[in-house]
C-alpha cells in the first residue's frame, strides 16, 4: 500500500482548492468539501453504508446544511487522476458532558443537519467518515483522520469524539454482550472492521451507546470514543 503523507497546512492546490493532506504519490488529496460536492458526497455515503437506515443516511440536503453550519469541518478526498470524489468526513464542534454521553446519533447531530454545531464548543464531533468501496485499503481514511486532527490543532480544541459503529458485532450478538465484544476488541483478542482501526489511531473507548442508530451490522450500538489533543492550550 502506498503510504499517505499528511501536512498541517495547505502546501498545494488541486482544482483551485487548497490541499490539506495528500498521499505521497499525489494520487489522492484531501480538500475542504464545498456545496457543489453535495450530490457526490451523498453517492459516497450510500456506497459506504448500505445497511444504514434511510432516515439516518446523509443526503444532498444534509451535506448542504453541514456547509451552512461549519464548512471547515467538511472534508473530501479527490482522485487527482479522474477528479472523482471518493471519500469524505463530516464534523462539527460541540461541548461534551462525559457523564451523559449516550445520545442517539440523530439527536446528537440535529437530525443529521448539524444544527447542534456550537462555534464555542471545545471538542470536534466526528459524525461521519467514509471511503468508497472501490478505493478502500489505499490509506485514504488515514489521510482524513490526519486532516481532522490538524483541524483540531489549528482550532485549539481538546480533541475528537465520535460514536464508532462496531460493525462486526451483529455477527456474534447472539453469543456475546456488546460489553464483552468491545472488551475483546480493546484487548486485541478480536478484530472489528471499524473500532479496531480507530483504536490503532490513538482513540480510547469511553463507553457504550445503546440505540445509537438503526443498523443491523452493529445491532444499533455505538461506542463512544475519544482522541485527546496533546497540544491543547488552556485560554
Image: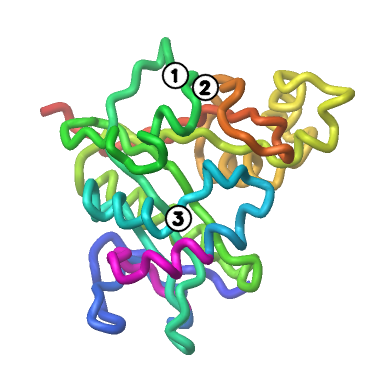
For the record, the magenta segment spans: 28-43
Mark 2 or 1: the one toward you: 1
Say which quarter of the image contains residue 85.
bottom left
From this viewpoint, is residue 66 visible?
yes
Say which quarter of the image contains residue 235.
top left
Tell me the residue at 53%/58% (across/down).
45
Left or right, residue 92 beside residue 89: left
Residue underneath mark 3: 59
Answer with mark 2 or mark 3, whichever residue precedes in sequence: 3
Quick one: SS at disc 2? strand
- Taking depth in this image into account, of 215 and 218 the one nearest to the observer is 215
Answer with mark 2 or mark 1, whichever residue precedes in sequence: 1
Tell me the residue at 49%/68% (across/down).
4
Q: How is the image coloured?
A: rainbow
x and y percentages locating residue 52 in the rendered image = 63, 45
Quick one: SS at disc 3? loop
The reply to whether discs 2 and 1 touch (Cβ–Cβ < 8 Å) is: yes
Q: Is residue 218 above or below residue 51?
A: above
Mark 1 or 3: the one toward you: 3
Residue underneath mark 2: 206
x and y percentages locating residue 16 in the rendered image = 23, 81
Give the Cα distance between marks 2 and 1: 9 Å
Amino acid at each position: 500500500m502506498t503510504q499517505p503523507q499528511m501536512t498541517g497546512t495547505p502546501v498545494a492546490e488541486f482544482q483551485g482548492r487548497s490541499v490539506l493532506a495528500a498521499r505521497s504519490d499525489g494520487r489522492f488529496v484531501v480538500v475542504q468539501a464545498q456545496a457543489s460536492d453535495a450530490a457526490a458526497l451523498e453517492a459516497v455515503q450510500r456506497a459506504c453504508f448500505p445497511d444504514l437506515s434511510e432516515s439516518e443516511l446523509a443526503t444532498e440536503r444534509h451535506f448542504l446544511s453541514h456547509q451552512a453550519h461549519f464548512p471547515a469541518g467538511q472534508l473530501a478526498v479527490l482522485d487527482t487522476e479522474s477528479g472523482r470524489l471518493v471519500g469524505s468526513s463530516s464534523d462539527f464542534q460541540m461541548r461534551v458532558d462525559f457523564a451523559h454521553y449516550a445520545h442517539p446519533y440523530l439527536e446528537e447531530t440535529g437530525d443529521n443537519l448539524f444544527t447542534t454545531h456550537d462555534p464555542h464548543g471545545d471538542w470536534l464531533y466526528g459524525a461521519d467518515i467514509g471511503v468508497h468501496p472501490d478505493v478502500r485499503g489505499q490509506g485514504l481514511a488515514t489521510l482524513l483522520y490526519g486532516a481532522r486532527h490538524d483541524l483540531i490543532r489549528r482550532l485549539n480544541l481538546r480533541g475528537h469524539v465520535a460514536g464508532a459503529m462496531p460493525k462486526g458485532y451483529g455477527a456474534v450478538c447472539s453469543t456475546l454482550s456488546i460489553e464483552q465484544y468491545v472488551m475483546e476488541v480493546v484487548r486485541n483478542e478480536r478484530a472489528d472492521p471499524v473500532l479496531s482501526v480507530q483504536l490503532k489511531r490513538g482513540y480510547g473507548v469511553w463507553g457504550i451507546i445503546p440505540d445509537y442508530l438503526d443498523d443491523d451490522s452493529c445491532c444499533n450500538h455505538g461506542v463512544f470514543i475519544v482522541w485527546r489533543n496533546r497540544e491543547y492550550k488552556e485560554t
